[in-house]
Each structure stands twice: as C-alpha cells, then as structure tokens.
Image (cartoon, rainbow, N blue to C red):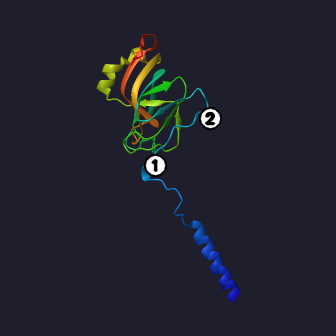
Amino acid sequence: MKKIYVLGLALSLFVISCNKKSEFQETTTPEEEKSVQPPLEAEKKDDTIEIFEVGKTITLRGKILIDKSYGPPGFGENPEEDEEIRVWMFYPEKPVQFYGSDGMDQVALEDNLVVDRLHIACYEDVFDENFKQKEYMGREVVMTATTYFSHTGHHKSRVLLSDCKVSFVDEYKPIIY
C-alpha cells in the first residue's frame, strides 16, 4: 500500500512540474497574442488571392450587385416574420484575403479570412449620390474603400466596405505618389 502511495505522489509531482512554465520560457504580451500576421508567401492557398489588412483602404476590381437578404427583427432566424431587404454587395473579380484587426476591437474570427463578396455599407442618401446606382449595377468597376469586420445583424458579409469611391474600369486612374 505504501508503494502505491509513493508512486501516486511521484506521478502527481511529475505532472505538476510538466505543467509549470519554466522561468526561462518566453512569454507573450496580450498585444502580441491578439495580433494576426499576414501569411507567408509559402502559406498562400492560391497565388491569385490578394491579401489586405482589415481597417485599411483598398482598391479592387469587380461588380456591384443587389442581394436580397433578411432584416429585422430576426435577420433570417424567422424568415416568415423577418423583413426582406435589398443589400448592395461588391463581388471582387477574385477572392480576397483579410487579416488583422480593424481598430474597433473586432479581431478576425478566423486567421486570414478569405471572402468572395463584400457588403457596401453606406447610408442610402450617400449611396444614391455617390454610386449612380443604375450605371454601375452589374458592370465591371474599380472600388476604393475602407474595410472593417462585420459586427451586427445588419452586416451581410464578414468584411464590409465604407467610404467608397467607384469608377468604371476604363475611367480608373490610379493615384501615383
């Protein structure tokens, strides 16, 4: 019986010592734990995917379309009772990858999130004024906008666009610094 007790005690001490951090072991600060780094070139799933940091202004080519979605009160949880809404979406010509934080304490839910559509988040009056809706609808355009992660039921994609500027592909003139 005494041997079993000694063996159990030794095993317990071994487990405890394995779980303790060495005083020489490197530790990370909370800021380092939150930061998400862009993938290395070798980690890219597809070399055609463009990679951007969320919270920055980006420029993409693609199409603007209207998607139907569910609005309040349940945003799709009760389709029979939820209001059907029209949402302006930007479909880039190829998938786009995002990493990082948008500065609103919204950290990527997945590392290096890849999306194929982006919700254009503008107020209706601003949108009508800036977007010549019918002219841009379904045509290839160049979109310059600031990105941020979704955080409410009103947002219809994982990454959204704000402060948008749109031009037809043939009218686009890049800014050269």
Which residue appears at 37% of the width and 21% of the height?
Answer: 165
Q: Which residue is mark 2?
A: 42
- Give the x, y percent position of residue 51: 51, 31
Crowding at dot 1, Cα within 10 Å, few <14 / some 14-19 / many 20+, comes out as: few
Mark 2: few/some/many CA within 10 Å (<14, 14-19, 20+): few
Relative to 120, does residue 138 appear above or below in the rendering? above
The circle drawn on residue 162 is none
Based on the displayed image, in which of its 4 quarters is residue 136 positioned? top left
Residue 22 horizontal/vertical position (percent)? 54, 64
SS of the residue under disc 1: helix
Task: Say which mark, if any, is on residue 32.
Answer: 1
Q: In front: 21, or 87?
A: 21
Which quadrant holds the C terminus? top left
State the quadrant of the N terminus.
bottom right
Query: What amino acid type is highlighted by mark number 1?
Result: Glu
In primary-sequence order, the first of circles 1 and 2 is 1
Name the residue at the bottom extreme.
Answer: 1
Q: Residue furthest top?
A: 170
Q: In x, y percent, where is residue 2?
A: 68, 89
Residue in the picture at 62% in, 35% down: 42
Distance Cα–Cα, label 1 vs label 2: 22 Å
Amino acid type at mark 2: Ala
Q: Could you say which quadrant of the image residue 71 lies in?
A: top left
The percent position of residue 30, horizontal first and vertical second, equals 43, 53
Q: Secondary structure at mark 2?
A: helix
Q: Up-down: is 163 above or below 173?
A: below
Q: Nearer the viewer, residue 165 or 90?
A: 165
Q: Position of 120 compared to 13: left or right?
A: left
Residue found at the very far left of the displayed protein? 125
